[in-house]
Amino acid sequence: MKLLLTGARIIDPAQNIDSRMDIFLEDGKIAKIGTDISKSLKSKSSEKITKIIDLTGMIIVPGLIDMHTHLREPGFEYKETIASGVAAAVAGGFTSIACMPNSNPVNDNRSTTEFIRRKAAQAALANVYPIGAISKDSAGVKLTEFWDLKEAGIVALSDDGKPVMDAALMRRAMEYGFSLQLPVISHCEDTNLSGGGLMNEGYYSTILGLSGIPGIAEEAMVARDILIAEFTKTSIHIAHVSTAGSVHLIRDAKKRGLKVTAETAPHYFTLTDESLQSYDTNFKVNPPLRSEQDLKAIKEGLADSTIDVIACDHAPHGRTDKEVEFEYAANGISGLETSLALSLNLILDKTLNWPELIAKMSTNPARILNLPKGTLEAGADADITVIDPLLQWTVDLQTFRSRGKNSPFNGRRMQGKAVLTIVGGEIKYDGR
Ligand code: DOR
Ligand code: ZN
C-alpha cells in the first residue's frame, strides 16, 4: 500500500519538525517527508500513489506509544483480551503499547511472552511489547530468567500492580536488568505504609471515613529506588507518579545526573481525591487520586521535564470487579480511549506545547524502552497518528472498544481526538 498524506501540520519532536508538509508511505515505511513531495511523486510513474488523503486542519504525529497498559489475557479475558485491548489502543491513537505482566499466569516466563506476542500478531492492530515480571509470579521473592525473557521478546521488567518490597532483590534486578538493557519499571508503594488504604490519606479520607494511603507510601520507595540506581550506577523508571513529594525526589535525582525517568497518568493531572465523595468505584485507582497540591506539582513536573512520559495505566475491569462495596472494588481506570484527549488539555491550559506533549506520548517512551519507533524520519516504520485538534466529542462508555467500561470520564466533553491511526503503513483505525 502506498499512501500520500497531504495538508496536515506535522509535528515530530525527534527531528524538531513542526510545519506543514507531506508524508509518503510505502511498504510499511515512511518513504519521504517534505514540503513539495506531492508534486514530484505525481509526475513519477514509478512511484504511483494508490491513495491520497487530504488532512488539512489535522495534526500528524509519530504513532503514540502507551508504555503502561494492562491487557488481561491470559487469565482475565472477561476484563480485556489482547484483541480488545489493541482495538482500544488504535481507537485511542496508540500504534504501540507495552503490556504489564500481571496476567494469570503472570508473564514471568518465555511461553507466556510468546503467547502474548502471538495473540497480538493475530489481532494485527497495534504493536504489543510485553513487559516481563521482575520476580516469579511477581511474588517478590525470586528473580525471573531475565535473559530468557529478553530472547522471547520482552522490552522491560516490572512487577507492576505490586511493588518489589525487598530492596536487595530490587538491587539485583536493576543490576542484571541494566546489563541486559532491560529497563526496570518500578511500581513504588511501601505496602507497610499503604496497607489496607482505599484512597489518598488527607482531608477527604478523614471526612469520608475511608482508610488512607499516605503520599509517603509512594515517596519512600521512589527515594529507595533512586538510591539503588545511584549506588549501582544503573537506571530506574518510576511508574505512575502521583505525589508532589515524588516529583521533588525525581527532579533532584535528575539534577544530580542520575539515570532516572518517570511517567504519570492522565488521571493524576485531571482529578483529585475530592471526586471520591461520590463513592464511585470508577475513581478507585492505585496509586490513589491525590490532592490539589499534588496535581499542581505533577503539572509542574511535566512542564519542566521531571516527568518524561504520559502513560495511561490502562486497567480494564469487569462489572463484577467494580460494582461492589468501595472496600472490595478493584483499582484501575480503562484509559486508552481517553488518554489523548485528557492529555491535550495540557496544551489548552498551557502546561505543555505540542512538541512537548508528543515527546511524552511517543518519542520518550520509545527511547526509554529502546523501541525503533517514535519518529517520522524517512526509513522509519510508518506508525502514524492523525489528530483532529478541534473535534468536540463526549466520552461514551458504550462506544469503548475496550471490554473495560470502568472510566470516571463517562459523559465528559472533550476536545481533540485521534481520527486516523496507521500502523506499519496500514490504516488500523479510521474515525473520520
Ligand atoms: O489501579 C491500578 N490497577 N494500579 C495498579 O497498580 C494495577 C492496576 C491493575 O492491574 O488493575
Ligand atoms: Zn502500578
Image: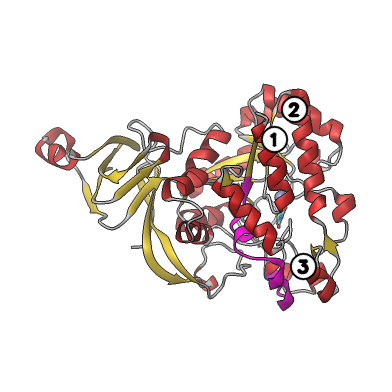
- The structure residue drawn at horizontal position 48% and vertical position 49%, both measured from the top left corner, is 357
Q: Quadrant of residue 141?
A: top right
Residue 329's tag is: 3
**Discs 1, 2 touching: Cβ within 8 Å:** yes
Within-10-Å neighbours for mark 2: few <14, some 14–19, many 20+:
some
Q: Secondary structure at mark 3?
A: loop
Q: Is residue 273 magenta?
A: yes
At which x and y percent is residue 260?
66, 35
The answer to which of 92 and 290 lies nearer the viewer is 290
**Of label 1 and label 2, which has the lower sequence position?**
2
Reading the image, the residue beneath label 2 is: 230
Q: Is residue 103 left or right of residue 33?
A: right
**Of label 3 and label 1, which has the lower sequence position?**
1
Q: Quadrant of ligand 1?
A: bottom right
Reading the image, the residue beneath label 1 is: 253
- The structure residue drawn at horizontal position 67% and vertical position 50%, both measured from the top left corner, is 240
Mark 3–mark 2 distance (CA, rounded to whole Å): 38 Å
Q: Quadrant of residue 288?
A: bottom right
Within-10-Å neighbours for mark 3: few <14, some 14–19, many 20+:
many
Residue 287's place in the image compared with 369, above or below, is below
Q: Is residue 101 magenta?
A: no
| Predominant secondary structure, magenta span | helix
